[in-house]
Amino acid sequence: MEIALQERLLKGLDNYFENRVISGVLNKEEAREIEERTYSNIIDWLGHKHISNMVKKALKDAIEQQRWDDLVYAFWQEVTFGTGGIRGRAVLLESELIELASQGLDAKILKGPNMINDLVFIRFTSGVANYMEKRNLEKVILGYDSRIRGRDFIELIARIFLNKGFKVYLFDEASPYPELSFAVTYLKADIGIEISASHNDKRYNGYKISTRTGASLNLQQRQEIIDEIYGNDQLAFRNIEFKEMRSLDLKQASKEKLAYLGGKRPLLNIENYQFINMHEQYLDHIKGFILQHDVIEKFAPKIAIGYSAFYGAGYKTVPWLLRELGFTNLKIIAEMNKLDGLFPALGLTQLADPGYIGSAKLAVKKFKDEYGEKGFKELDMLIGTDPDADRMASIVNIPEQYRDVCGEWKLLTANDLWTLVLWYRLDTIANRYEGIVPDANKKFIVKSHVTTEALRRVAQKYAVDCVDTWVGFGFLAERIIEEWKKGRINVGAFEESNGFTIGGAKPKPGEFLGKEGHTLEKDGTLAAILVAEICAFAKSHNLSILDLLNDLYLDPNVGCFTTIEVTLPEEGVFEGMEGELLKRQIIKNIEKMADVVNEKPCSIQIADFPIDQAEKFATGKYDEFYWRGFPDEGIRFHFDNTGYNHVTVRPSGTEAKLRFYVQLKVEGLTKQSVWEKRALSERLVDKIARESIHYATSKKF
């Protein structure tokens, strides 16, 4: 490294961190520690013999251009390896996103260890391969969604595994992550990896990991892989033969070691390599969860369904299944029904999450642009899936007479949608057996602890057990596996973040897929099909989805639970190092607020609700990155002792955000007041969430 450049780097970082100390963002000790780590990582990359001159040139240019914010972001730490895999920013500038899309993996863009790029993928994947090697694991399934250069990244990863002698099954086109998860169980593979950043904005990328059961890594597996990636020095960049990883031609791979997965016929020139029609197996499996084929056959053609793929991998699977089942009146938003990781209709920082109100507004606008106001009013439901199609959400029209109170349309919360799904499935089964669910004492549902209590009430109505877990579908899957050992049968796994699956019973010997169950990963395609069935059921009774929900709210065995999730920040994320440190300060302030409440109950009020007590949830899995007792599962503020009314603040596991979850049980509903009271309660939980954010960010404890 040239002396002049090194001096410029040192001087620039000194000035940058000195200004952060002066402005109060960092104290001197924090600034010194982060500056030393940032400088060391930059020097390591500039001196690394296996990092290309192109990457080094882009890094040097960033120094010359004094991009100190970007340099610190890219080098102050490493991408965190979580239970789901890795996820982070692939680019820091919109122009770099365009460059990556047009020029490929060798694009001259700023890269670093705290970002997602080919170098980080090689390093992390080498650790995963070492983990597999030591445990005599042999088979891996690889896929990708619509993220920029997903195909290039997954082929790079394929080379790593092939180079180490593993059997590789490679999807020949972008496919939903749940399909890859299903393929892992179906083909009895050991690991699955999909290039995806799920619902994150277009600047992000990463990959998700599935294990033999189709679930993500458990905490022990995660730690064992981390040990292989980092070794003894967490921030050292190992000497990995990068050129060797990139040079293998897949067409020269052994035909015993490489196979392809796809649809009826290969989309690539794969010559004589084995090819498996995985799409057919996956879609046929999903069709097996339909409960009332006669209802669908008669009423599906009468249902008007809209669909938005949000430029993602559900663009084929969801429409194909709906049409296959007879939902022929299907209107697809054409503009977003294609694979495009630039997400053209979405802003730079906008989430591609169908359950996010901003995305819902976009979907409604694009639908109306294509089909008009009349076309939208005729819809029974507008369904959306995210880019890797593991999340699903839906929008319904509000009846004309209630629009003054409730608005033109409604984005159903996952809490309401899953409550309806569970009720429909249990009630349909019970009606076949004189009102009783067979073997109910063996059956259970599992939900995250921030997901609605209405699910528990529905389960209890049919004598089915309800089990709570931490947030993250991996925890739900882990609990299902534990319950399998007790001979129990899972009839639903639900997450507030638009995630759903059915685990079924313990797999047969030698199998990994639950008996009469689906993969242990949330699946937006499965959810879309089951919700469409409920639409047909409602139509058969001359009702709407909202009518069915209102009946549930009025059922004294269930009741009405109004919930909301509001994020901080509401748009975008906590950006860069400063954003991360601000997030930590807010969490520490919330911890202090909890201490104040527990020392003096009802001393703090939010939206005129006195806080009765506070409860802290910590698993310890991120203590090494934050501090001992870090509340990774949140802090809950109870308004009373019922367990129903509370606000929970939790750091997101997928984005640099804080999530504020509010739940209130609404009493005194009648058939005449249900619409108005429900609307009033929705405004109230929104007020509670926003006042909670105000307390967390402006009050000092």
Image (cartoon, rainbow, N blue to C red):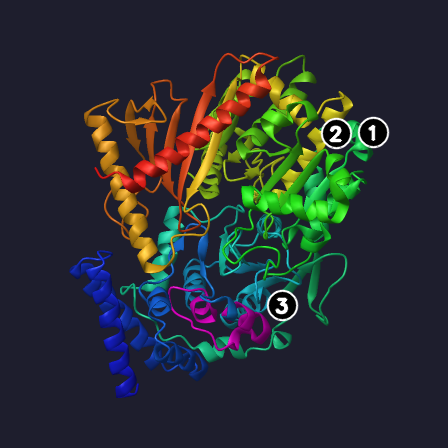
148 w.r.t. 386: above or below: below
Element at label 3: loop
Left or right: residue 261 compared with residue 674: right
Q: Residues within 10 Å of mark 2 (few under 14, many from 20)?
A: many
> As displayed, is residue 678 above or below residue 414?
above
**Label 2 close to label 1 by CB (< 8 Å):** yes
Calculate the distance from the C-alpha at mark 2 to the C-alpha at mark 1: 8 Å
- The location of residue 595, given as percent across then percent down, is 21, 32
- For marks 1 and 3 on the same chain, the one whose residue lies earlier in the sequence: 3
Q: Position of residue 161 (x, y in %)?
A: 51, 67
Identify residue type, mark 2.
Ala
Apparent side of residue 480 relative to residue 296 in the rendered image (left or right): left
Q: State the separation of the CA atoms marked 1 and 3.
A: 48 Å
Q: Which residue is mark 1?
A: 298
Amino acid type for the residue under numbered disc 1: Lys
Q: Is 298 left or right of 3, judged from the image as shown?
A: right
Residue 256 - label: 3
Query: Which of the marked residues, 2 or 1, is nearer the chain's N terminus?
Result: 1
Q: Which residue is mark 2?
A: 536
Q: Provide residue 511's location: percent of width, then percent of height.
A: 58, 44
Residue 494 vs residue 59, the one in the foreground: 59
Quadrant hosting residue 505: top right
Q: Residues within 10 Å of mark 1 (few under 14, many from 20)?
A: some
Quick check: marks 3 and 2 in contact, CB under 8 Å?
A: no
